[in-house]
Amino acid sequence: MQFFTIFSTLLLTASALPAPHKGEHPPTYTIPGSDIPTVPSGHPTKFTPYLFRFPRPSDGSAIVNTEEILTSLQPHGFNRSHLHHKFSATMNGFAADMSEHCVKILKAMLPASGVIIEPIVTYKVQAPLATPQLADSKRFIAENRVKNPRQAPAPGITSLQTQTNAPWGLQRISQKKMISIGSNASPDKVKEPIFSYTFDETAGEGVDIYVIDTGVNVDHVSFGGRAKRVFTAESLKQDPLDGEEDHAGHGTHCAGTTGSRGFGVAKKARIHAIKVMGRKGSGSSSDIVAGIDFMLDSHRKRSKEADFKGSVASLSFGLDADESDPNSRSSSPILERAIMKANLEGIHVVIAAGNQGIDACRVSPSFLSNAIYNGTNLNYAAHAITVGATDIYDNRADFSNYGPCITTYAPGQDILSTYIGGTEATESLSGTSMAAPHVAGLVAYYLGQDQSLRTDIVAMKKKIMNTSWKGLLHNIKDSADSKILAFNGV
């Protein structure tokens, strides 16, 4: 079952990334009311959802004041109830339903390059959602036994522990050899918690993992109170059938792999649930940007606190490329810009590669791991981490995207983790959505060991790649592929 999230968009225009946030407060932009066109007779009836971004002026002039823009549009038919979000951390802009007349007025208020406009689009998870299973509570208790202390095989490791009832993915990232389950083993054996996971006892303690997804079942016993709901898109809050809880299961499953006690890589990390997708596994691009905006603001505040150990973003969504056109490449510039703004400010961003079985460089946002920001349009810093999926036999999963944009591979087929339907619910799912949380958890795990990596996105990516196993994978289609498998260094 493949759970990489998919959506598509129309690109109208794009611009270069902004300079890193430095806390400056430039003067606001004053709207030239005398140049605003007159309102047409009759009221517009068709409203289209858009994302609006105001680029930072390259000539040093005053920035656009979003509130003044919205106020000036009201006499021309804009209603405040049509406003979805205002963005301030990742960009200066907003999302709203707007008539074409108001769009023309907005453009007339500003210089020719003063606004970037992109339609809001809806995306969905790729496969039907699974039915939750209720399991014995013992399954969720990480029965760790402390090994005799030995010389640390990697910098930062203190004392090793072993979980004896782990999912196969955790065992695979903590050993070099391929897991042997026997040629006559039942296909369901891989879905059982019968494997062993060896890990450093620091286990990502105190690191902040932001799971931007369908929400998280924070009451699950395997989170032990470390998972919190921190943001829910307003459109989902207002839906009586959705609200703040995870009704899809996808986000809970991903969160469980990053940091739950029974199924997670970083068992002591803090999990922050950012809900931008609803019960049907669908949502808007504006809600995703709003979630990223919240995350960046939270990261800025946390980075000033004494107990801050680093921020990790787990992103298991993306845009499908057109498979009928081998030269097609998906792109959502405003969303990509928000992701890279967060990354450039020190949030370690981990992205699922996608489930189309094609070159990951054709898919947004997974291509962000391999593009270089040189100050021109549609170029980004190559510090995001993109993750492909493998099965228990060290094959690239047939559904997994591949190619030079893959930073590393990780277990992503038949992955057991936390789910919805109860405080002890589990489910086994497949997809690059399941692989990326292994590496997001691994980033948190390394942050718990080495505080020099807190906001060093370049050094962290190098560590992930240098620590991964080389030359073990099969079914790799592209000679330029990284061909490496994530490893926790024990």
Image (cartoon, rainbow, N blue to C red):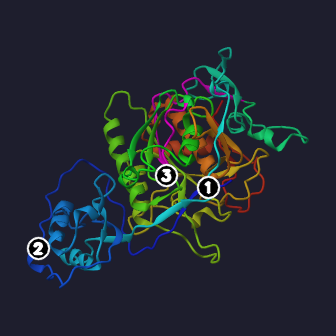
Span colored in magenta: 196-220
Where residue 325 sits in the image (x, y, percent)?
62, 78
Amino acid type of the residue that numbered disc 2 sits on in the rendered structure: Pro
Q: Could you tell me if residue 266 is visible in this image? A: yes
In this view, 255 is above or below 335: above
Q: Nearer the viewer, residue 50 or 199?
A: 50
Would you name the residue on which mark 1 appears? 406
* Numbered disc in front, either 1 or 2: 2
Left or right: 440 in relation to 272:
right
Whole-percent x and y of residue 174? 68, 33
Residue appearing at x 22%, y 70% in the figure: 78
Kindly indicate the quadrant of the structure image that contains residue 177: top right
Q: How many marks?
A: 3
The picture places residue 304, in percent across and down from the top left corner, at 31, 34
Distance CA(mark 1)–CA(mark 3): 12 Å
Q: Within the image, what quadrant is residue 176 found in?
A: top right
Q: Which residue is mark 2?
A: 32
Q: Secondary structure at mark 2?
A: loop
